[in-house]
Amino acid sequence: FSRNAELAYVYIALSSVFLLGAVKQPPTIVKQSLKDYIVDPRDNIIIECEAKGTPVPTFQWRRNGKFFNVGKDPRVTMRSRSGTLEIRSSGKPEDYEGEYQCFASNDFGTAISNKILLRVSKSPLWPKEVLEPVVVREGESLVLPCKPPPGLPPPETFWMDSSIMPIIQDKRVSMGLNGDLFFSNVLARDANTDYSCNARFEFTHTIQQKNPFTLKVLATRNVPETQPTFLSPKGLSSSKIVLRGEQLLLECIAAGVPSPNIDWIKKGADLPSKKVKIENFGKTLRLLNVSEEDSGDYVCMASNKIGSIRHSIEVQVKAAPYWLDKPTNLVLAPDENGRLVCRARGNPKPTIQWLVNGEPIESSLPNPNRQVLGDTILFHSVQIGSSAVHQCNASNEHGYLLANAFVNILDMAPRMLGPKNQLIKVIENNRTFLDCPFFGSPFPILRWFKNGLGSGLDGGQYKLYHNGTLEIKQARPEDQGTYTCVASNILGKMENQVRLEVKEPTRIVRAPEHVTQAKGTTVRFDCRVKHDPSLLATVTWLKDDKPLSFNWIGRFRKDGETLSIYNVNPEDAGTYTCTAKTEIDENSASARLTVTVYCSLAGRPDPPQDLELSDPSARSVRLTWVPGNENNSPVTHFLVQFEEDRWEPGKWQNLSIFDGNLNSVNLQLSPFVNYQFRVIAINAVGQSQPSLPSARYQTSGASPDVVPSGLKGWGSKKNNMEITWQNTERNGPNLRYMVSWRRKDTEEEWNNTTTTRTKHIIHNTDTYVPYEIKINAINDFGHSPESNIVIGYSGEDKPSAAPTELRVSKINSTKVNVHWVPVDPSTVNGEFKEYKLYYWREASLMKGLKVNKTKLHKGFFTTAEQPSGILTELFPYSKYKIYMVVANREYEGPQSNTVEFYTKEGEPGAPKYFRIQRHTDVVHLKWDKPLEPNGVLIGYTLQYHTVNGTQAGERKVQSFPANVTEYLMNLPNRFTRFKFYLAARTQVGAGEVYAVESPHFTNEGQQASRLTLCSVIVGNGGIDCLPDYLISLQNLSILFCTSLFLLPPLCVCVCLLTAYKEQEDIATQGWFIGLMCAVALLVLILLIVCFIKRSRGGKYAVRDKKDLPLDPVDHKDQDGSFDYHSDEDNKPLQGSQTSLDGNVKESDDSLVDYGEGGDGQFNEDGSFIGQYTVKKDKEETEGNESSEATSPVNAIYSLA
């Protein structure tokens, strides 16, 4: 750190320690009254003097250079533990006027205040006088004197008449700086009133009025016109002295007919526009915050149509002393060296005087360890007991400066001044500061560490400040951790920790959208928020930047992240803002609500009409139009567009957008453009058609008034520099650019060129040298201001040197320290970017393990003399190779020496897999070794415990050698569930854990139940269900299967299927129990119906004849369905009824649409679509049975 920065921080840190009363401190003045102190005589007089120190300082006062005994004056008291004086207002306050100075002392020195000049405010009465009427001829000049009584502070003057009405002032009549009222020429109407000067006194809040002047004007038939003459100041020249930092007031008031105009110039320079104000109708020039460069000759020129006259004012800027180097408190350890510096500037040059404990240093006790050299005091090998307060007084004829600076000799081990173990939460990618205030003497060295590892953090992503604060330029998730700051000196060390947590930013992922809604409807604004899950986020709503209130009976409702407004009214229109806020950040989004009160359908507005131009000026014109019909939706904005016929004819461009309640606007224009305008109206529905164009309006040309922006210089090749910039406004014809450049830090002449392009290339440059560049724009009317000088660089070349002596140290399993000897900066041949370390994993030390040899790199930005860095995220137990290059912005240099090293063993990764096979009374565990053993495996550790809901049983541990990869464990009962944790081990320790949980025994083979229809076989009066296809499905089984008898000759078989699903007991599911009850009830009802049918004697004959072969051609009905039929489809079946018209009528209970074949099919959800077909006769049916597997369930039902 720089010594000055170090001393500044020492004082701040020391102040914190002193507040705790732990360290002795010389006095320091912390509060005092003004040097020039004017008080109100009606109030108590308070003269302030506050100081701090340890021990607490005692106070004394001097008045007019002599000891002031406060105790002897009953009207004067001193506040407790303070030096502030309070003088009661009774009696004559003038008796206490004078120069006061406060002295604050303790065992370690004396600090003194400024000399406080105490004066009592005065507001004297105006002297009595009889004023004769003032007689003047019309057209002559006149000065009415004010001459207010001298007050303290001086009064403010103004002119009024006897009716207490202010005198109207203008170019002809005005008040001067001295309070007099000046008439450039008198008119007859000036006699209609009287004129009284008034003085306002600030402290007493009183106004004193002078007797009024009566004016008699002698009329003249023809008032002669006269050339200007000066009323103030007199003559052709004058001079004025002003102090630096104050304001300069110059005045020129002239007589003449007609009334003259006043103009101001500065000889040899322009008036500084940012500091100058022209006031009082041009007669007064006010220059704020005067500095030395404001010296010079200022000329005022008074002119009318008859002639002109000039007056020159020479302005000299003097200066009371002001600080260049103000002495600051100095804390030294025994035998240390130090210095106090007191440098001030002023005009005339100030003299420097040193004091010690309030007395001149020449008369103080000699100190062999102290040496005074003008404005500097040197201290050598200081010793305990030589603490003191030194004063520096810098003075000249215009004022003085006084500064106290103590020299405190301390011997102290480091101390931490901030809170312990602080938790800092920051948003990702934000700049972050970790504070570590500390103190010690000698001044400690402070270093930061992350997670207790590595070398000190400074450089690259980190920046360390002299006060101990560590800056992280862009906090990332990997920057989370515990940061330790360690302060150390020869007497010891002290440390503190800061825990940093990096959080995701709060974002509004779905913002509210603009809404136009009719009155009486409901509006909803959505505000979906995403935030860091560890932070609590609250969403608040505002209307027009004012918070909304919500209640259950109001029209405004907040439901989570949604705002609802019921029965909207026109007054609900406005801007609604949702703000999502956490403890460390917030985000907001807004939307507008427009409420329409029209019942008709809204549409786009009609275009505006009757465009007119008025009030023309050089760079503006007023555009007025008549709005068109709004079409039931109010116009919210008007868009004004323009087209010009010089640069881009025929192209309409947006100029400005205005509120919808305006129809006359002032347009700001560019020079040298031939404009025409049109207007577009906008409402919630959309935009109108453009209006008809206005008449054309031509602006006059001007020189470019904007400096070309974006000026920069960079090299595209090693021996050139490209200078580029952005186009500026033309303002006139023949726009071009004058570019100037020269080598930086040389006295060579500027090179320049003129071009119409926005790029200029300089060839044959040296490699990476700095250039000064400037530019201005030129057209036929003139040139723009010159730009600021920009530093550009010629092109870069490949670095010519490589880092040397690359080596590694402190190798562990995942990281290594890297050291190298840096290159000479001149060999970088460009802007230094980083040292780039290339590294790759050459091999694993585990035999047979293949590795990825991709080459990676990491950059180190450092300019240290002995650079080093840390290479992290390495694989344990591996062979690595590295080399380094230096890089500039464009190129990388040659390679350094290649270094080979071996990382140590680490903790292994998780096992490749970990599987559980559950049986009735045992669990079979099986696993494989990790993909990354990270060392020699010595075994596995298995931990497990029982699981009962959310309760976990006692954890048990089992160890296995490295060659064992499976384990059989007996179960106490088949309903017990376990959770297993498996980790591989090396010599370093156990690695990543692989956790699995065993399935519940009663859930095995269960997933879902599905009601499914299967094929039907009718024979021998029996019915067989054949759901054999179900058995072939993976993880599917038949829970039960039964036949549902319908009307002859068909029946339907219903099967309930189940499939395996882990960890779900289907037998306890409510839906399953309800389904079983419904199926049972349905079966019972159908059986009863079938029993009744049988009891009536119905027969279940299928056919009298064998089925004829089916027609192989599909015939499609008109409704798009397919009908499969044979020749004999029109013949009635036995048991069918014949209708009255002779057609065959099929049984109402039969299944319609028979399909071909007996193969079962599944639909998309896996259920079986039964395909029904008529069978052959019994013999053919029996012959086919051998080709189909009959399910055991069907066999049972077929016997029924």
Image (cartoon, rainbow, N blue to C red):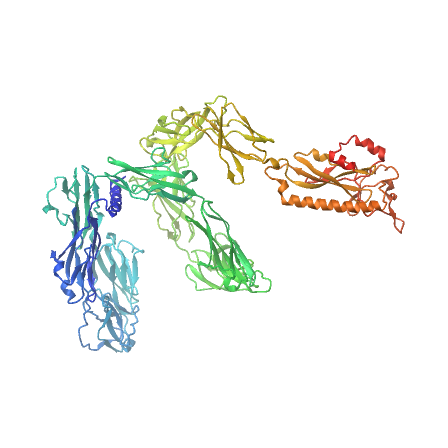
Say which of 323 and 542 sits in front.
542
Count how many numbered circles sit on residues in the image. Answer: 0
Say which of 98 and 167 sits in front.
98
Residue 970 place in picture, x, y as percent: 56, 29
Say which of 50 and 1160 sits in front.
1160
* Residue drawn where x is 87% and y is 47% of the image: 1137
**Farthest residue toward the top?**
847
Q: Is residue 547 above or below residue 739?
A: below
Say which of 328 and 628 sits in front.
328
Quadrant of the drawing holding the N terminus: top left
* Residue drawn where x is 38% and y is 41% of the image: 499
Residue 508 place in picture, x, y as percent: 49, 49
Q: Is residue 439 above or below residue 281?
A: above
Can residue 227 be seen in this snapshot? no
Residue 825 place in picture, x, y as percent: 33, 32
Q: Is residue 66 above or below residue 214?
A: above
Residue 255 place in picture, x, y as percent: 25, 68
**Farthest residue toward the front?**
972
Left or right of 273? Residue 23 is left
| Location of residue 245 by image quarter | bottom left
| Location of residue 330 by image quarter | top left
Can residue 1127 be seen in this snapshot? yes
Quadrant of the drawing holding the C terminus: top right
Q: Is residue 734 above or below residue 830?
A: below
